Amino acid sequence: MSTSPISAAQPDASGQNSSARIIFASFIGTAIEFYDFYVYATAAALVIGPVFFPHSSATAQALSAFVTFGIAFVARPIGSFLFGHFGDRIGRKSTLVASLLVMGLSTTLIGFVPGYDAIGSLAPILLCVLRFGQGIGLGGEWGGAALLATENAPAGKRGWFGMFPQLGPSIGFLASNGLFFALAMSLSDEQFRSWGWRVPFLVSSVLVALGLYVRLKIAETPAFQAAIERKERVKVPIATLLSQHWLPTVLGALAMVVCYTLFYNATTFSLSYGVSALHIPRQTFLGLLCIAVVFMALATPLSARASDRFGRKPVLITGIIAAILSGFTTAPLLGSGEPLLVLLFLVIQLFLMGVTFAPMGALLPELFPTNVRYTGAGVAYNLGGILGASVAPYIAQLLAAHGGLPWVGAYVSVAAAVSLIGVLCMRETRDTHLM
């Protein structure tokens, strides 16, 4: 039994399942959660090292900051196991509300943690605990948001509906980076390092309240309601996933690697390298990133439309091949230190991130049946994060220090090739019915 495209597109009796409400709820949640996540990524590149890790070497500070950055990516699969279990057992809506609360609380509290100078080694310990909490919350967010969109999508428009959670990262990043940019322009370096960097973390509490209001207004998805009526829920979704659906989980994770590597190479690593090694002013580089991420946002709907028309695999293969080639632009463009060439590098990387990321909102849910779809999509998405993002800034920092930017570019190309293998090995999912 498949979900009716007519019932999916139209509101229920209470009006809670209207397309506009579903689109906004799936978008706003990921925008807020990725805002929270990117606030930390930007802070890790700019200030976390000197505030929480008082090493004498700037490189050692950056590496320590990027270790804490990676902790959340280790936590994210745990979050996808935890929230996926309840999302497949009790429903998408309540689980999405819980994940937003965990993420928002962790982010807000980071803004209150004193630095190393105030409480010593307790400071980095608290930071790591809260960073782990961020990962847990985000691990449960994306899969539910993608299911909220795709399980309500009309026939032939699943890629388009699945695109709206994928827009969340662009908007979340723009809001995060824009706020840091405004602070960098209005505060002195001493003010920014003393208290200014905490402001974006505290703003999260207001955004989370907005997200909760929207999420509490939505209804359960038709596909999950049908699964309840057919008594198809399983007791332990993760056990069913690993025993019966391990291959699409692995392939989905491999497909995600290119997205993460492109993004965090272009943002977290490049920001750190541009400010510390190329001596580009912090506010200038943040401004360049704000411009470049607009191209990521523009690529997202274009790629989503193309995936509905031509299929998920052709769009992804095209984008991934371009990403492999983009690795060769790292040294000549980023390494030039010229703002316009650096901007071109950032635009290329983030545009391709949008191209490869957009189809994932539909593809990953399409790989799994309803009774393990929340768990499966979330686990694949977040395992890809461990492979492609958790260590990406750290590895890029090491490669830049020991081999130079050509090695960083080679790393991007190899990561994209890993995703190409995963996509080539998976089936086309465009015409899959979400039962």
Image (cartoon, rainbow, N blue to C red):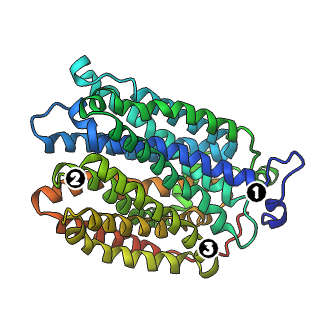
Above/below status of 336 relative to 56: below
| Quadrant of residue 264 within the rendered picture | bottom left
Residue type pointed to by label 1: Ser
- Report whether 226 appears left or right of 384: right
Q: Secondary structure at mark 1?
A: helix
- In the rendering, at what x and y percent does residue 336 appear? 18, 66
Secondary element at image label 3: helix
Residues tagged 2 and 3 counted as in contact (Cβ below 8 A): no
Q: CA distance from mark 2 to mark 1?
A: 44 Å
Q: Going from the N terminus, do you reach mark 3 or mark 1 first?
A: 1
Q: For residue 228, say whether it is visible.
A: yes
**What residue sits right under mark 2 in the picture?**
280
Q: Which residue was labeled with disc 3?
A: 305
Q: Which mark is residue 71?
A: none
If you read the primary sequence from the N terminus, does the residue marked by circle 2 or circle 1 appear first?
A: 1
Inter-mark Cα distance, 2 to 3: 37 Å
